[in-house]
């Protein structure tokens, strides 16, 4: 049951729960009139501490189409954040007003913190360069709708695999389906984080790291393009050097299978030439529409049951997270470094993994 649960990581939903969401989203898509009052009287709080167009509008459209209402902010400078309010306190306060929270935050792990203090479900709408589980639901639903399955697929993921949070959530979620194989296309500097490499190894997922689209496009069932995440770079000259490293155009598309699909979480910058938009294999704009239906399904499931008291009280662990982008570097959250065995410790909030020898 998804009732009253938070969705912070794509692994928070089981494969069966995701299947249930597909079925519900299909029904909403084909019989929208049945759902127009489904969330009447319910209120969604959208807390966007970082810019967003499609995700915020997608959630707001989803809630409005279910007959619910939306409050919130899209610019933290107009909220109490500027007075120094912590994420934990904001979550407690919004819990008292709303029925569900959707949060986007630049710090990795911030929505996890909110979920630990909130009395209502929290949905992570993107935390820094870490996770974006509802974009993954959108991606999975698109793949499922096109291929009729989510297993036995070769997925080529291209671009910023280091900071691209949609990529991180997608890799985790797809790793659970039988026969998934990844081609990871990125420059050396933008390879996937260590913890994801470990994750794929633990789940026996086949993956190959390559430098060019041409090396793998002919084999792929899905080509998942992403933009280079400018806002995550410490050095803008580094961004300038890497920004146009991949551009998908009609010439490269010639080598792709006829039933291959091109996906992109959007916004696009230069990584897909406009001419590709007219290729029937380009699915990125349809993908955005699927996102609204799957979010409607998710909201419905999470709101099945209302308010519950939350008495979480965390005891800090001995070690500290070393990721300077982690929420624990900015707010006084108790450290939660989980012992993964073999002297490895992983942060509960941001997944950053370190080896500590004593
Ligand atoms: C993505 C994001 O915010 O991570 N956008 C989105 O939610 N659709 C991708 C991106 O910004 O590159």
Image (cartoon, rainbow, N blue to C red):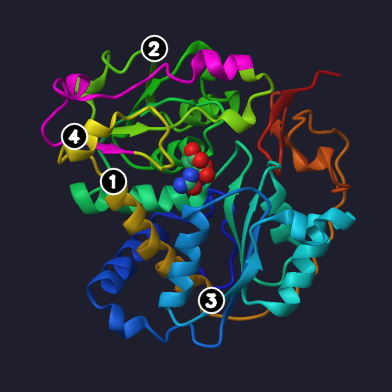
The reply to whether dot 1 and dot 4 touch (C-beta < 8 Å) is no
Q: Secondary structure at mark 1?
A: loop
* Coordinates of residue 50 in the picture (x, y in percent): 64, 48
Identify the secondary structure beneath mark 2: loop
Which of the numbered marks, if any, corresponds to residue 303?
Answer: 3
Badge 1 or badge 3: first in the primary sequence = 1
Measured in 3D between alpha carbons, the distance from the residue under mark 2 to the one under mark 1, in whole angstroms, is: 26 Å
Residue at x 56% of width, y 49% of height: 9
Dot 3: within a 10 Å radius of its alpha carbon, few (fewer than 14), some, or many (20 or more) residues?
A: many
The Cα atoms of the two marked residues, 4 and 2, are separated by 20 Å
Provide the residue designation for mark 2: 211
Q: Is residue 266 left or right of residue 338?
A: left
Rendered location of residue 97, percent (x, y): 71, 79
Residue count near mark 2 (Cα–Cα under 10 Å), binned few <14, some 14–19, many ≥20: some
- Mark closer to the observer (1, 3): 3
Provide the residue designation for mark 1: 150
State if disc 2 and disc 3 touch (CB < 8 Å).
no
Dot 3 or dot 4, earlier in sequence? 4
Kindly report the distance in space between the C-alpha atoms of the residues bearing marks 1 and 4: 14 Å
Horizontal and vertical percent position of residue 122? 62, 63
- The answer to which image quadrant residue 95 occupies is bottom right
Mark 4 or mark 2, earlier in chain: 2
Residue 220 against residue 209 in the figure, above or below:
below
- Residue extent of the magenta highlight: 237-263
Mark 3: which secondary structure?
Answer: loop
Task: Left or right? Give the position of 221 relative to 166.
Answer: left
User: What's the mark number on residue 260?
Assistant: 4
Nearest-to-viewer mark from 2 and 1: 2
Residue pictured at 39% horizontal, 20% vertical: 185
Mark 3 near ligand 1 (CB under 8 Å)? no
């Amino acid at each position: 049951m998804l009732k009253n649960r938070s969705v912070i990581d794509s692994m928070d939903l089981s494969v069966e729960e995701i299947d249930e969401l597909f079925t519900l989203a299909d029904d909403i898509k084909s019989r929208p009139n049945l759902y127009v009052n489904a969330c009447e009287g319910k209120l969604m709080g959208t807390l966007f501490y970082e810019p967003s167009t499609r995700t915020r509008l997608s959630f707001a459209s989803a809630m409005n189409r279910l007959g619910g209402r939306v409050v919130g902010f899209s610019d933290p400078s107009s909220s109490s954040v500027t007075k120094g309010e912590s994420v934990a306190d904001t979550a407690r306060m919004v819990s008292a007003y709303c029925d569900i929270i959707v949060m986007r935050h630049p710090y990795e792990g911030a929505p996890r913190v909110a979920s630990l203090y909130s009395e209502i479900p929290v949905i992570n709408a993107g935390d820094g360069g870490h996770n974006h589980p509802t974009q993954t639901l959108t991606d999975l639903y698109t793949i499922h709708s096109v291929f009729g399955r989510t297993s036995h697929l070769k997925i080529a993921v291209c671009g910023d695999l280091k900071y691209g949070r949609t990529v991180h959530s997608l890799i985790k979620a797809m790793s659970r389906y039988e026969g998934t194989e990844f081609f990871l296309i990125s420059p050396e500097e933008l390879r996937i984080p260590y913890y994801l490499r470990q994750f794929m190894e633990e789940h026996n997922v086949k993956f190959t790291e390559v430098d060019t689209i041409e090396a793998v496009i002919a084999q792929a069932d899905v080509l998942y393009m992403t933009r280079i995440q400018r806002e995550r770079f410490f050095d803008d000259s580094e961004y300038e050097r890497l920004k146009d490293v991949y551009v998908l155009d009609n010439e490269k598309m010639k080598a792709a299978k006829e039933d291959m699909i091109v996906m992109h979480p959007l916004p696009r910058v230069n990584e897909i030439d406009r001419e590709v938009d007219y290729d029937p294999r380009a699915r990125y704009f349809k993908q955005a529409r699927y996102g609204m239906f799957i979010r409607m399904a998710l909201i419905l499931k999470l709101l099945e049951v209302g308010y519950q008291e939350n008495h979480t009280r965390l005891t800090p662990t001995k070690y500290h997270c070393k990721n300077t982008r982690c929420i624990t570097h900015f707010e006084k959250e108790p450290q939660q470094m989980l012992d993964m065995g073999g002297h490895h410790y992983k942060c509960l909030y941001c997944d950053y993994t370190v080896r500590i020898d004593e």
